[in-house]
Image (cartoon, helix red, strand yellow):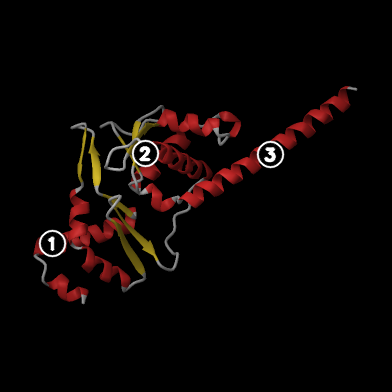
Amino acid sequence: MWNDTYEALSNYEKGEFRRLCNYLLSHTYLVRDVYKPDKQWTEPNSDFRMVNRLFDCMRDYFALSGWKLERDDNYGVIALFNEYGHNRLRIDRFTTLFLYTCRLIYEEGREQGDNLHIVRTDTGAIVEKMRMLGLLDKGKTTQKERLEAQRALAHFNIIQKTETTAWNADGNGALIFPSILSIVSNQGINDMMLELEEFRAEDTDASVVSESQELEEFE
């Protein structure tokens, strides 16, 4: 039983157990490697190592209340999911599209990435990709939208900025973590591209109708 294992832990380990359980409930994902902007290198995540060490005990503990703790040793991701679909976060449209675009960039870049499964990009490249895909309203986005999208994804350890300064709406270097694979699957990418093509087709039809109406009025 998990409680027998828990009672055998040291006081320090018990404290880490409680802290990291709360961290996972808030952040959902933990990644094995994180970037240290002040040192400008990537190093192992001590929180990930501790959860990995306590994994069986934490998994059984969460299971009692309907939570499922999962671990992907290949990509180095630990994730916590609610088995009943509760406690889901609803994000706005721009953040959703920002997330999908990050997933596309990750898919395109991970083959050239290193063995840490981390893809490097920047805010400008993500926004430009959104513009190319026709995901931006009138081809534009606001500073508020960009800041909120970046902060939201960073909170859940999906992306991380590479600077020591705060997130900047005008642009940051960013790392996309493999945790994004748990949120948007390959099928999710395919579905998104199909929906995008349908959106473009509908937009084109509407444009043709509009031009036809203008021509009739001119005549």
Give the residue type at disc 1.
Glu
Please tell me in which quadrant of the rendered image residue 24 appears.
bottom left
Residue drawn at the location 26% of the way across and 71% of the way down:
60
The residue depicted at 24 percent of the width and 49 percent of the height is 32
Residue 11 place in picture, x, y as percent: 9, 64
Residue toward you, 79 or 151: 79
- Which disc, if any, is residue 111? 2
- Numbered tag placed on residue 201 in the rendering: 3
**In the rendered view, would you say 106 is above or below 59?**
above
Name the residue located 24 percent from the left edge and 42 percent from the top edge.
34
Q: Amino acid at mark 3?
A: Ala
- Left or right: 117 in relation to 186: left
Residue behind mark 1: 13
SS at badge 3: helix
Q: Earlier in the sequence, mark 2 or mark 3?
A: 2
Q: Residue at x 41, y 67 (%)?
A: 83
Q: Nearer the viewer, residue 200 or 146?
A: 200
